[in-house]
Image: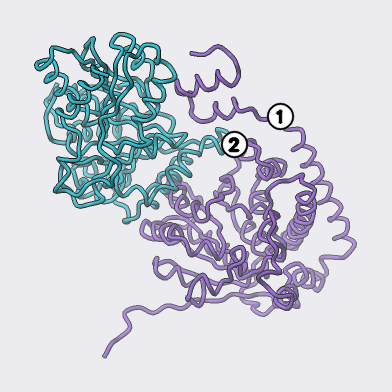
Chain colours: A purple, B cyan
């Protein structure tokens, strides 16, 4: 005879269904009409930004870009649940969260283009520059959270990765450190179904990604990642739990990326069908939230049109500002290797600039 | 002044810095209650509390990631990798992350982290504990590599490393931990990073070494003097990244001959870089090619054959004799 020594369940949270109907009224967040409209505006902005970024990328004016359409509810809903003093550790697709947390858009353009200024996050903006190595930011998150805990600050570290990222050892190490040390951290996974081309079911035999939290002894919750209210609700709970000293949480947002992995030659038709794509597009985060807001009488098509124009203008201004950035030099790169260049680097710098060596 | 082993000098330096700078945190596997497997952190948790000196879960990438996150929030972490042979587990967090923090962020974020780790061999540990992987980090831009050769140096260099505004790998040779004692002042002193030390003056050849190979080189120099009447100048590099090429060149201008003694395998390591820099800056002062006295390019050896694999004073003397006759 055996007996269970521990039992777990993985909750799934949805508040709005595909048609914008409230399926879980008990969980409706207490947001003002203005805040609800703000969520919609941010999702509209993100969709417009994405379309513009894809175009710019095709024209060779952006460089590296990882499309976000389809994931707006996940990205906007979770960031909206944080405070400005909370610290974000993003991956390369998490540009919308960075932007709405205060990272200037023109610098995000510069980051995409491969300009050093892109990563120079302004003082007072609580965000790390985007991470490229899958999962590397996840083991850094407990460090940021421990700093807050040691200083007695009521702040939270929140990090983002994708379904592929949960296969990395660093994903477990990061959650485990945060759990073992009871740190104010949130691990937010956007399960967009594909790690480049590899489908979610090839990543793990686990039924959900959220259940990976169980092994680290922290709560894990799965949320409808196309439902901005549900994402906001679960993230808000996780962030406020962390802030109250009750420890970390892992969230799996089930979502979908409409576009390619990046604009560097990925062709999604090689690994997913038109039917799959259409199935997810019916769950679109903007459509369902628009319906919900319209049913409450706080959103209209003309309003959305006006806001689209505004969003385009913001993007244009940022692009202009990015174009004005000073050209980098190799000497500049040498100067940012250390606080004081080593003797070796000083010599190498002089070789490049032709200025007096030694 | 007190007589200290190198491990005592390291504990003493950590103690001083924990007292002086509240941003300093010491952590890793077994470093808290147990005081470290070599006792480098003995008594520090008791003195400074478990908030500042603590045990972590057993995961090297997690440990260095923790240091990275703390550093970008203004702390000065001093994590320990229990044996440097385990560093591969943390390679991305060191070479891919820490070493690039300042550069990637245009100076907005920095990583004043000092990674301490026992390395090298000669104490018959299980395989993959002993290793000389320092060369990997000589090739890693953005991180300094410091290797003390005795207790006095260990204290001054460790204090300088922790106070450095950029990441440092501080490698402590296991054989040096308790092999001898030395006078170590109890007051605060630092030894600047990137400045080599001439530990024996001589006019006939220059011997460049670091870590445990410094005393091997010194023994060889004494033997050479007795046997042949030649005087070798011995340089303790102290840091192998950056390399203090000026001190090396100055010595070669006098001796016109040089060898590099290195415990790590021969190819593409610190010794190779030293030879390359000598080639660039001092070739016209040389009477003979610069030779390397190193083990062959095998994996770090099994415990039972370490003593045959590692460079000995006799091997260094033989190499010196070679550069005199070339």
Residue B213's spot in the image, x, y percent?
22, 30
Label 2 Cα neighbours within 10 Å, binned few <14 / some 14-19 / many ≥20: few
Residue at the far bottom in the pictured view: A1
The chain letter under disc 1 is A
The answer to whether B119 appears left or right of A242 in the picture is: left
Q: Quadrant of the N terminus of chain B?
A: top left
- The Cα atoms of the two marked residues, 1 and 2, are separated by 20 Å
Q: Quadrant of the C terminus of chain B?
A: top left
Residue A3's spot in the image, x, y percent?
30, 86
Among the 4 quarters of the image, the one containing residue B70? top left
Camera-side residue: B305 or A333? Answer: B305
Residue B6's spot in the image, x, y percent?
18, 32
Residue at the far front in the pictured view: B326
Residue B112 appears in view: yes
According to the picture, the residue beneath numbered tag 1 turns out to be A326
Camera-side residue: B206 or B111? Answer: B206
The answer to whether A198 appears left or right of B76 in the picture is: right
User: Same subunit under labels 1 and 2?
Assistant: yes
According to the picture, the residue beneath numbered tag 2 turns out to be A123
**Residue under the image location 39 percent in, 52 percent down:** B62
Q: Nearer the viewer, mark 1 or mark 2?
A: 1
**Residue under the image location 20 percent in, 45 percent down:** B35
Secondary structure beneath label 1: loop
Residue A246 appears in view: no
Label 1 Cα neighbours within 10 Å, binned few <14 / some 14-19 / many ≥20: few
Earlier sequence position, callout 1 versus callout 2: 2
Camera-side residue: B144 or B315? Answer: B315
Camera-side residue: A310 or B4? Answer: B4
Residue A44's spot in the image, x, y percent?
78, 59
The chain letter under disc 2 is A
């Amino acid at each position: 005879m055996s007996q269970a020594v521990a039992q777990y369940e993985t909750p799934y949270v949805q508040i709005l269904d595909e048609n914008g109907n409230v399926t879980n009224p008990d969980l409706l967040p207490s947001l003002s009409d203005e805040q609800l409209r703000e969520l919609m505006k941010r999702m509209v902005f993100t969709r417009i930004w994405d379309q513009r970024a894809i175009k710019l990328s095709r024209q060779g004016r952006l460089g590296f870009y990882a499309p976000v359409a389809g994931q707006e509810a996940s990205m906007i809903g979770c960031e909206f649940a944080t405070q400005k003093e909370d610290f974000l550790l993003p991956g390369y697709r998490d540009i919308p969260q960075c932007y709405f947390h205060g990272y200037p858009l023109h610098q995000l353009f510069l980051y995409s283009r491969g300009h050093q200024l892109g990563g120079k996050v302004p003082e007072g903006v609580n965000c790390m520059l985007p991470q490229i190595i899958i999962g590397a930011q996840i083991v850094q998150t407990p460090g940021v959270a421990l700093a807050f805990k040691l200083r007695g600050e009521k702040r939270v570290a929140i990090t983002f990765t994708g379904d592929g990222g949960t296969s990395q050892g660093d994903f477990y190490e990061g959650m485990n450190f945060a759990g073992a040390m009871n740190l104010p951290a949130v691990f937010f996974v956007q399960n967009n179904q594909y790690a480049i081309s590899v489908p979610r079911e090839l990543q793990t035999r686990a039924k959900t990604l959220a259940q990976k939290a169980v092994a680290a002894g922290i709560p894990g919750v799965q949320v409808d990642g196309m439902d901005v209210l549900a994402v906001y609700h679960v993230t808000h709970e996780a962030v406020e739990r962390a802030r109250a000293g009750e420890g970390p949480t892992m969230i799996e947002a089930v979502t979908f990326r409409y576009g390619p992995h990046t604009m560097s030659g990925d062709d999604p038709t090689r690994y997913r069908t038109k039917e799959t794509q259409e199935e997810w597009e019916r769950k679109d985060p903007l459509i369902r939230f628009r319906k919900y807001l319209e049913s409450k009488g706080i959103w209209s098509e003309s309003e959305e049109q006006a806001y689209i124009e505004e969003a385009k203008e913001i993007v244009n201004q940022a692009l202009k500002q990015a174009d004005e950035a000073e050209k980098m030099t190799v000497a500049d790169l040498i100067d940012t290797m250390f606080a004081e260049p080593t003797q070796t680097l000083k010599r190498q710098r002089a070789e490049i600039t032709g200025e007096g060596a030694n | 002044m007190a007589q200290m082993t190198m491990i005592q000098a390291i504990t003493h330096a950590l103690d001083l810095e924990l007292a002086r700078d509240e941003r300093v945190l010491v952590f890793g596997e077994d470093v808290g209650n147990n005081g470290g497997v070599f006792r480098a952190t003995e008594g520090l948790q008791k003195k400074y509390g478990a908030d500042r000196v603590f045990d972590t879960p057993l995961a090297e990438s997690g440990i260095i990631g923790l240091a990275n996150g703390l550093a970008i929030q203004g702390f000065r972490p001093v994590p320990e990798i229990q044996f440097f042979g385990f560093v591969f587990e943390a390679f991305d967090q060191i070479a891919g992350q820490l070493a690039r923090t300042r550069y990637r962020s245009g100076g907005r974020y920095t990583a004043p982290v000092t990674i301490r780790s026992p390395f090298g061999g000669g104490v018959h540990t299980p395989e993959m504990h002993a290793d000389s992987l320092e060369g990997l980090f000589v090739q890693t831009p953005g991180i300094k590599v410091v290797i003390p050769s005795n207790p006095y140096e260990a204290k001054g260099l460790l204090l300088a490393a922790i106070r450095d505004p950029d990441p440092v790998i501080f490698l402590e040779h296991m054989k040096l931990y308790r092999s001898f004692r030395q006078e170590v002042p109890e007051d605060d002193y630092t030894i600047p990073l990137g400045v080599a030390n001439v530990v024996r003056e001589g006019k006939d050849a220059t011997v460049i070494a670091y870590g445990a190979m410094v005393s091997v080189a010194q023994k060889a120099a004494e033997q050479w003097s007795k046997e042949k009447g030649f005087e070798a100048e011995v340089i303790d590099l102290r840091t192998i990244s950056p390399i203090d090429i000026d001190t090396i060149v100055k010595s070669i201008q006098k001796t016109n001959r040089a060898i590099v003694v290195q415990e790590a395998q021969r190819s593409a390591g610190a010794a190779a870089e030293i030879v390359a820099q000598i080639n660039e800056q001092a070739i016209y002062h040389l009477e003979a090619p610069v030779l390397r006295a190193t083990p062959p390019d095998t994996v770090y050896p099994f415990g039972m054959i370490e003593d045959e694999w590692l460079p000995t004073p006799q091997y260094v003397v033989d190499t010196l004799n070679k550069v005199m006759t070339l």
